Image: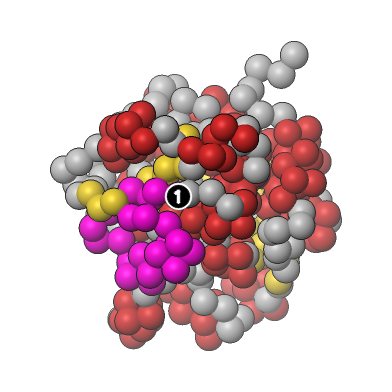
Amino acid sequence: MNPLPISFQDIVDAHVRIGASAHRTPVFSSRTADGLSGASLFFKCENLQRMGAFKFRGAYNALSRFTPEQRAGGVVAYSSGNHAQAVALSAKILGMRAVIVMPKDAPRAKLDATRGYGAEIVFYDRYTEDRDAIGAKIAEEGGLTLIPPYDHPDVMAGQGTAAKELFEDAGAVDVLLVPLGGGGLLSGCAVAAKALREDCLVYGVEPEAGNDGQQSLKSGKIVHIATPQTIADGAQTQHLGKHTFPVIQSLVRDILTVSDADLASAMRFFAERMKLVVEPTGCLAAAAVLSGRLDVRGKRVGVILSGGNVDLAKYAALLRDVP
């Protein structure tokens, strides 16, 4: 009996479920990146996923499993942007109402895209208000189903399909690096990686300013922090989830951190060398390798680039300020 909230079979089933709607994103390599790291790097480009991020996988998997009654009621979600867009697009495809709770300071591009997919937006202050409570209240009062951004088995299973594809397209890797916010992507990818290669070392990477995951793994319990100040807006989470944490505890080797400067440097690398637009959060895993935070010399390394949704003015400013 599987003690964890999801199994590899759940990921296999999710892959079939999302197959007709999600993109099978490419795996890119770079001789320059290999030279900098001393390893063979394989970048899973979820910045080229529908709506620009891996979040579409988990959102579509979760919404596609709604009962007829749930579909009639609609979905509510809370997100800084990528989960918002993923739920909004999935709801549009599946023909249901979507209400999204978003922070007032969410990137303009993410707000515009979420509205463009037809969702209704409810704003909140990420530093003073509780998005969980707001989402739960809307769900209860309006008869909608709440789908959180990471702490849900169907979401986790959907996200794990990214690692499954990476292994299928690039072959087994010795090390897998995954961005970490609330843990949906990391937990799903860890389950897939360990099923496909038991001795694969899986690492999560989060911002230095928001290292709740690192603290949680070391202390053996979920650590709550204040909303971190970081350019990685998709990783401004305050804690891991009750579903994601047990998976991370069981399957993840360690959690690393990188600075905002590391993220900006990685963004510039992808723009200049690989002609890819990757948002700060999407660069977390890559930054750990490109900055030398993890020694992967001689290894085959999978790196998840989780998204590419970034305000262009902010993007230009971050690239301009890189030394």
Residue 252 placement (x, y as % from top left): 59, 36
Disc 1 marks which amino acid? Ala
Q: Which residue in the structure is indicated by mark 1?
A: 98
- Does any portion of residue 213 appear in the rendered image? yes
Task: Name the quadrant of the N terminus.
Answer: top right
184 w.r.t. 81: above or below: above
Residue depicted at 78% across the width and 33% down the height: 9
Foreground pick, 53 / 230: 53
Residue depicted at 52% across the width and 82% down the height: 271
Tell me, yes or no, whether the highlighted magenta stretch contains residue 319.
Answer: no
Q: Is residue 82 left or right of residue 233?
A: right
Residue depicted at 33% across the width and 55% down the height: 121
44 w.r.t. 63: above or below: below
- Does any portion of residue 155 appear in the rendered image? no
153 w.r.t. 162: above or below: above
Foreground pick, 113 / 176: 113
Count of residue discs: 1
Q: Is residue 274 left or right of residue 257?
A: right
Residue 217 placement (x, y as % from top left): 46, 30
Which portion, as a residue range, is magenta? 98-121
